Image (tube, coloured by chain):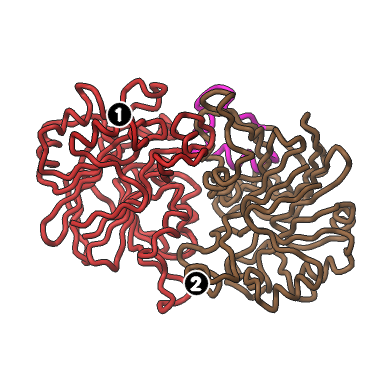
Chain colours: A red, B brown
Amino acid sequence: MRIRVLGAAAGGGLPQWNCTCTNCSALRNRQPHIQSRTQSQLAFSADGEAWYLVNASPDLREQLNQTPVVHPDPSKGLRNTPVEGVILTSADLDHVLGLLLMREFTPVRIYATETVRSILQANSFFQMLDRLPGQSRWTTIEPGISFSEKSGFTCTPIAIPGSFPSYVAEEHRIALDGDSAVVGLLLESAQGKRIAYLPALPSVSSSLKSTLSTCSVILVDGTFWSDDELQRIHSMGHLSISGPEGSLAAFRDCADIRKIYTHINNTNPILNEQSRERQLLEDAGWEVAYDGMEITL
Amino acid sequence: MRIRVLGAAAGGGLPQWNCTCTNCSALRNRQPHIQSRTQSQLAFSADGEAWYLVNASPDLREQLNQTPVVHPDPSKGLRNTPVEGVILTSADLDHVLGLLLMREFTPVRIYATETVRSILQANSFFQMLDRLPGQSRWTTIEPGISFSEKSGFTCTPIAIPGSFPSYVAEEHRIALDGDSAVVGLLLESAQGKRIAYLPALPSVSSSLKSTLSTCSVILVDGTFWSDDELQRIHSMGHLSISGPEGSLAAFRDCADIRKIYTHINNTNPILNEQSRERQLLEDAGWEVAYDGMEITL
């Protein structure tokens, strides 16, 4: 199985349009110790032909352009794509706006929990995905229930404590199952190798940790280095990297797993390749995802 | 007044993610006679300090990144922007999705007709622009009614026959004024020089033509070369360039105006710098907009 990180930044990307933090400024000044990153986006393929996207970031148009394996094939007609489906982990704008960029009459299958589907289908913008019969096809997924696709992978959504996106109205929330507003994903190759993708992770329970310990690779929420990095409103739903309750400590004993941080906020010091924080993290056996990073299972 | 084309392509951009047309394929094969283009986006400034966006394309994050004059200023704090406002010409997704990328708590003023504002405010996604009091401020504009800003320009919305975006529900349309679903813009500098921006133009009336004849520069809908270029559903609302009813013919006698095509669909042969169509257009005194094009009035 090939997994490709198309975007490794949190919402806003790196640099962020209105931000003058050390990282954003270093990028605008073309300093060599930091790379720009688009908003978090994953693609994977079990057979190298059918590709699946995990979420659909606002940067998807550029991310697909930069990735030849997902370009359309001129021998297959005027309009086509190797992208067979999109698996959503939440209804956050940073994870779904890209769907609205895929609306030019090419069929797409969308995998989402009933909660995520209900939130999106209540939004009139998503009617743009239904201008032709069969243009968008929804498949309901549920935490703990695996599904397989013929190209040779199994995907198991993982229950993650999470909240509704702020744009969801109070009266709509009442009718929704809050326990499936956010999921992680466990992807398994035909050979039984596993990778976990958890771009939003508020805490690490012991049951989650035992699930992750069956993985060869984990791609984990690296939004913030510390809890007080940004206004509190931002940090909700994201475990910090450092600190006694942070993800570095939580996975300290998982030496056999390849551990990669992704969904990294523009203010996070680990983005600076010469920072003390980056060094600490690498000393603990972690890597930092970047746009174009390829992982083979 | 400085006007900068941040994106010159129609919706979908160039190349388009799922398209194998001659232009998209030529770009993927890195042929030298064609340039990539992001989705249509304009920025302008009367004083070189306060910048205004015309529309907010889905590619806005990358377009702002590529344009140093609209970067935030480190001497003005952690979060700031020289972008003072966004003037909308319609509620089409290709013209508004970028607003959702500007939501990181920086105040923005949005100029829109009552119709466009009503369509957008009915959509829950736009609540993300109201997470802080005063974060988004709406100013209502009307065709034929000029407004001025202190940095030194006057803007007059121009009535354009247009339709509602397809995502607007039938029951909502009844309550809306269809005559202000789409507008063009006439921008005038303090010195009285004028530029018109008409990214969607279904026809050229004699009154519109006399308005445009007062301009130094016109940036005009160049979506399609011919009416049968693409599925009919796409071409609605866009006058073609060629043909007896096309824009080349309509402006044949306007030799004194600088004439530029923008909002160009990926299938349009004028994008190929070596095409017969490009030559015809240049022979008629027209230019083709590109990302980064700067116009000074």
**x 20%, y 23%: residue:** A245
**x 28%, y 55%: residue:** A294
The residue nearer to you, when weighing A158 against B44, is B44
At label 2, the amino acid type is Ser
Give the labeled residue for mark 2.
B25
Question: What subunit carries mark 1?
Answer: A
The residue nearer to you, when weighing B240 against A295, is A295
Establish if B206 lies above or below B231: above
At label 1, the amino acid type is Arg
- Observer able to see residue B222: yes
- Left or right: where A33 falls relative to A201: right
Give the labeled residue for mark 1.
A276
Question: What subunit carries mark 2?
Answer: B
Q: Residues within 10 Å of mark 1 (few under 14, many from 20)?
A: few
| Residue A157 position in % (x across, y down) | 22, 46
Q: CA distance from mark 2 to mark 1?
A: 45 Å
Given this view, does label 2 or label 1 mark the residue nearer the observer?
1
Pick the quarter of the image with the N terminus of chain A: bottom left
